[in-house]
């Protein structure tokens, strides 16, 4: 489908039926999926506000930026919405190595009829812009300034892209969409959590039509996500344990805010802990391997106390028999 640039959404889906949200909204979608459509994760749990913001992005061509602490489900959320709309989706990680030429394109030497010729190879942006593709810039706040200014041009609706050296102006495909995820909204590495992020230009932040926040969820919702990922914990004892694990994660987040610990437990880490528990069969060992060893030596007693408080047992130091 992405190789048939003429294609536009050819059906509509009900938000209530497909996403399980309390809304009468219907959104455009594609009948068939191509290789760029992400795979559906049946265990994925949608969050009312964030999902609606993303759906508005797809349905009304809004530029949506999802901001939130690490491991809260920003990237996977966009991917899972696209999966259910059969909307081709391309994720680009804007780490410090992505430069302007990667985005726009560059001249490259290619072989044509046995001859070496120089040809313009379009970068990711011209390619996506002319197709029915949801382009997701992950780690948007880590993007280099030269890259950010290229993106700024296409952030506006109908934002055209001028390829200066090619003398061409590209008009976006009607089903081209643009999303981004970021841990910060432009203030840089204020709390020391996110090394490598940049302060963002406010003219750029201003161009995003919708900024959705995906910080930590209600404990009951977080428990439901962990259980969806690790269904083996679905019995009564397992559920109790997951509730204790999520409570412990909550303590690390409070402790982080108070400056007691320097590493907080993200929902991703809680999921990893539950998965490692399946492998090792020991909740304390799995905890040490998934989280405690990431903490500074000096913080281990605090972490051990959190463990004791939530799980009602001691966390033996690693190396103990
Ligand atoms: N609502 C959810 N339902 C099911 N699984 C979820 C949900 N939210 C997050 N997860 C799982 O949590 C993990 C982390 O999600 P994801 O990578 O999307 O986070 P992120 O916010 O993009 O993190 P980062 O800021 O580090 O990029 C993934 O394995 C994902 O499948
Ligand atoms: Mg991400």
Image (tube, helix red, strand yellow):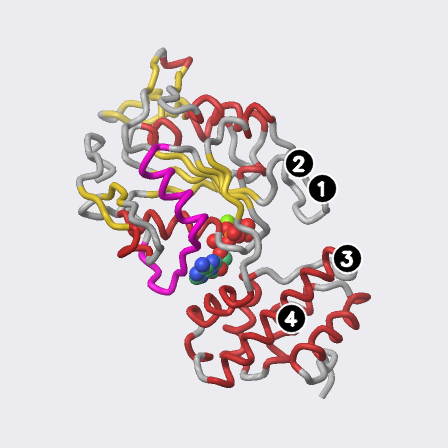
Q: Is residue 7 left or right of residue 83?
A: left
Q: Is residue 288 left or right of residue 58?
A: right
Asked whether mark 1 and ligand 1 are closer than 8 Å, the reply comes as no
Q: Earlier in the sequence, mark 4 or mark 1?
A: 1
Q: Earlier in the sequence, mark 2 or mark 3?
A: 2
Give the residue at x 56% y 67%.
270
Q: Report crowding for label 3: few under 14, some 14 to 19, many 20 or more residues within 10 A (C-alpha).
A: few
Q: Is residue 295 left or right of residue 62?
A: right
Which label number is shown at residue 258? 3
Residue range corresponding to the magenta coloring: 39-61
Give the residue at x 33% y 55%.
19
Residue indicated by mark 1: 190
Q: Secondary structure at mark 1?
A: loop
Q: Earlier in the sequence, mark 4 or mark 3?
A: 4
Q: Is residue 295 left or right of residue 165?
A: right
Contact between labelled residues 3 and 2, with CB atoms less than 8 Å apart = no
Residue indicated by mark 2: 187
State the count of labels: 4
Q: Report crowding for label 4: few under 14, some 14 to 19, many 20 or more residues within 10 A (C-alpha).
A: many
Q: Earlier in the sequence, mark 4 or mark 2?
A: 2
Indicate the quadrant containing the C terminus: top left, top right, bottom left or bottom right.
bottom right
Indicate which label's residue lies in the foreground, 4 or 1. 4
Give the residue at x 43% y 33%.
63
């Amino acid at each position: 489908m992405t190789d048939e640039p003429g294609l536009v959404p050819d059906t509509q889906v009900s938000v209530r039926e497909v996403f399980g949200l309390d809304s009468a909204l219907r959104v455009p979608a594609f009948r068939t999926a191509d290789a760029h459509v992400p795979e559906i994760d049946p265990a994925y749990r949608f969050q009312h506000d964030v999902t609606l913001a993303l759906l508005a992005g797809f349905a009304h061509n809004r530029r949506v930026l999802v901001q939130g602490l690490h491991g809260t489900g920003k990237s996977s959320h966009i991917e899972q919405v696209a999966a259910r709309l059969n909307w081709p989706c391309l994720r680009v990680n804007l780490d410090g190595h992505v430069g302007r030429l990667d985005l726009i394109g560059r001249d490259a030497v290619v072989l044509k009829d046995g001859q070496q010729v120089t040809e313009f190879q379009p970068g990711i942006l011209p390619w996506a812009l002319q197709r029915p593709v949801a382009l997701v810039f992950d780690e948007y706040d880590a993007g280099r300034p030269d890259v950010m200014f290229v993106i700024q041009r296409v952030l506006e609706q109908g934002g055209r892209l001028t390829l200066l050296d090619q003398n061409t102006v590209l008009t976006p495909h009607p089903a081209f969409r643009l999303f981004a995820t970021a841990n910060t909204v432009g203030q840089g590495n204020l709390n020391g959590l996110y090394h490598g992020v940049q302060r963002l230009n406010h003219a750029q932040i201003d161009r995003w039509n919708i900024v959705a926040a995906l910080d930590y969820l209600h404990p009951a919702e977080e428990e439901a996500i962990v259980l969806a990922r690790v269904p083996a914990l679905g019995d009564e004892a397992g559920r109790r344990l997951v509730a204790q694990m999520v409570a412990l994660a909550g303590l690390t987040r409070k402790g982080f805010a108070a400056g007691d610990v320097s590493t907080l437990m993200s929902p991703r880490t809680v999921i990893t802990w539950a998965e490692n528990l399946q492998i090792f069969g020991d909740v304390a060992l799995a905890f040490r391997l998934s989280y405690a060893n990431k903490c500074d030596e000096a913080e281990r007693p605090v972490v051990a106390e959190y463990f004791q408080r939530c799980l009602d047992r001691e966390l033996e130091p690693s190396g103990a028999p």
